Amino acid sequence: MKKLLDIKIITIIVLVIVIFFMGKCNRDSVNKNKVKVNGQTYTIIKHTTDTLIIPQIKTVYKQGKTIYKETPIYIELPAKIDTNQVLKDYYSQNVYKDTLKLSENLGYVSVTDTISRNLILGRTWNSHINKIVIKDSIFLKEDPKTQFFIGGNVGYNTNPKSLIIGPTIGIKTKKERFINIGVGLGTNNNFYYQGGIYIKIGNNGIK
């Protein structure tokens, strides 16, 4: 009975040491490349920022009668007037074009007016505006978790000859180290203890 109690005490002490060791490793592994999403911790593996320019093109036509006109200002006429030239200019259609370029490569706005008989017959304006969209992408990888396993082991001791059976507790740390602690009882009524730590070799698994 006392022997069984000693086994339990030793097992508890070893587990406390292992858990303390894992906690320290986990605290040391915290860095600025961690983010939390819905309470889950992730590691930032890539952060990219792309600037996209999306052209926004629009054309609008307005009839002259819908364009605001101020009260005309009359001026004194010269003594000699070329009536034919005046009538020719009056009935002709003149087209005026102007383009306003926006700063910082945002695009341009162009205006075309058609004028005849001192009236604006129509106006067309075209806008070519570059919509700037900044695409911010963050690629995350879920952080590994500490995992616990429970199982059993079977062994054989040659001296003295004895079949050993007992439980085993396994712990996989966030750094992918595997620690196991086990206790076994032989058919010779002796207790046996075992423990180990395994370190992952390489990142490629077997397919």
Image: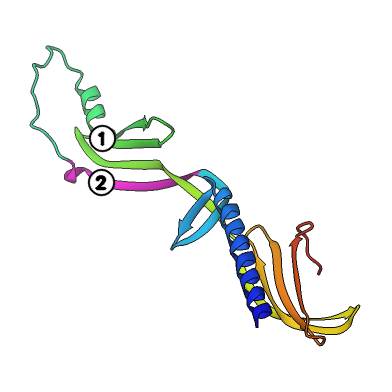
Query: Measured from the top left, where is residue 185 in percent x and y?
Result: 75, 83
Query: Measured from the top left, where is residue 22 in percent x and y?
Result: 60, 58
**Main structural element of the magenta stretch: helix, strand or loop?**
strand
Residue sitting at the far top: 79
**Can you say whether 184 is above or below 47 in the image?**
below
Question: Which of the two residues, 49 or 11, is positioned nearer the viewer here?
Answer: 11
Which residue has dot 2 on it?
A: 62
Could you say which quadrant of the image residue 9 lies in? bottom right
**Can you say whether 58 is above or below 193 in the image?**
above
Could you say which quadrant of the image residue 55 lies in? top left
Q: What amino acid does circle 1 point to?
A: Ile
Q: Is residue 56 visible?
A: yes
**Can you say whether 178 is above or below 95 in the image?**
below
Q: What amino acid does circle 2 point to?
A: Lys
Query: Measured from the top left, where is residue 121 in percent x and y?
Result: 24, 41
For label 1, the SS is strand
Instruction: Write the residue at 54% across / 51% down.
Output: 27
Side (left or right) of 120 relative to 161: left
Mark on residue 115? 1
Disc 1 crowd, CA 10 A, few/some/many (<14, 14-19, 20+): some
- Magenta segment: 51-67
Instruction: Write the residue at 36% across / 42% down.
Output: 126
Side (left or right) of 207 relative to 101: right
CA gap, disc 1 to disc 2? 13 Å
Mark on residue 85? none
